[in-house]
Amino acid sequence: MIQNTIDYQIKSTWHAIFKMYNQVAAKYGSSQAVGFFLLSIAKEGTPATSIAPLMGMEATGMSRIIKSLEDKGLIFRKQDELDKRMVRIYLTPEGVEKRKIAKKVVEGFNGLILEDIPQSKLSVFFEVMDTINKSIEKYKITNNKG
């Protein structure tokens, strides 16, 4: 019964993707989370406060991840040139190399999907996922009353 629910299908698929990415990342001494983090950093630096929302995370655990990636020599922090209150995260040369690997893996996997699923079905998929996200917000509003 539960396997026929929408949320089970999404969770099951995400779990398989997550596991696959972690297996590939492990070959490079990394993880899916590190790869995703590195892909979230722009060349011109990314404000530290913007990273958690980009990754769909809460800001509370972000400082530990940033510190860990700094210790590994993948990123560094630098005060913004114009707004001294802002800290930007930049990739080190090693971080850039790990980011290239992560990007290649993600593009490769997405390429396989594009070979197997026609664009017309993907358009519907993205429309459905957008609607599900809107339904989540509606559900949260409805269930936070009272």
Image (cartoon, rainbow, N blue to C red):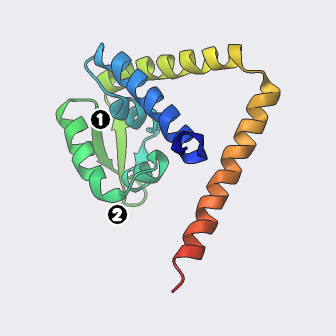
From the viewer's perspective, is residue 131 above or below residue 94?
A: below
Quarter where residue 135 is shown = bottom right
Question: Tag 2: residue type?
Answer: Arg
Q: In the displayed structure, does residue 62 sit left or right of residue 6? A: left
Rendered image: mark on residue 31: none
The residue that disc 1 covers is 75
Q: Nearer the viewer, residue 51 or 17?
A: 17
Tell me how many marks there are: 2
From the viewer's perspective, is residue 112 above or below residue 135?
A: above
Residue found at the far bottom of this picture = 146
**Position in image of residue 49 (x %, y %):** 39, 56
Question: Tag 1: residue type?
Answer: Ile
**Position in image of residue 12 (x %, y %):** 49, 35
Q: Secondary structure at mark 2?
A: loop
**Position in image of residue 73 (x %, y %):** 22, 29
Q: In the displayed structure, does residue 107 sit left or right of residue 17? A: right
Residue found at the far right of this picture = 120
Q: Nearer the viewer, mark 2 or mark 1?
A: 1
The residue drawn where x is 58% and y is 74% is 141
From the viewer's perspective, is residue 81 above or below residue 18?
A: below
**Position in image of residue 39 (x %, y %):** 45, 32
Quarter where residue 117 is shown = top right
* Residue 99 makes an appearance in the image: no
Q: Nearer the viewer, residue 37 or 44?
A: 37
The residue that disc 2 covers is 85
Q: In the displayed structure, does residue 59 sit left or right of residue 1? A: left
* Residue 20 makes an appearance in the image: yes
Q: Secondary structure at mark 1?
A: strand
The residue drawn where x is 43% and y is 57% is 82
The residue drawn where x is 55% and y is 15% is 108
Looking at marks 2 and 1 on the same chain, the residue that comes earlier in the sequence is marked by 1
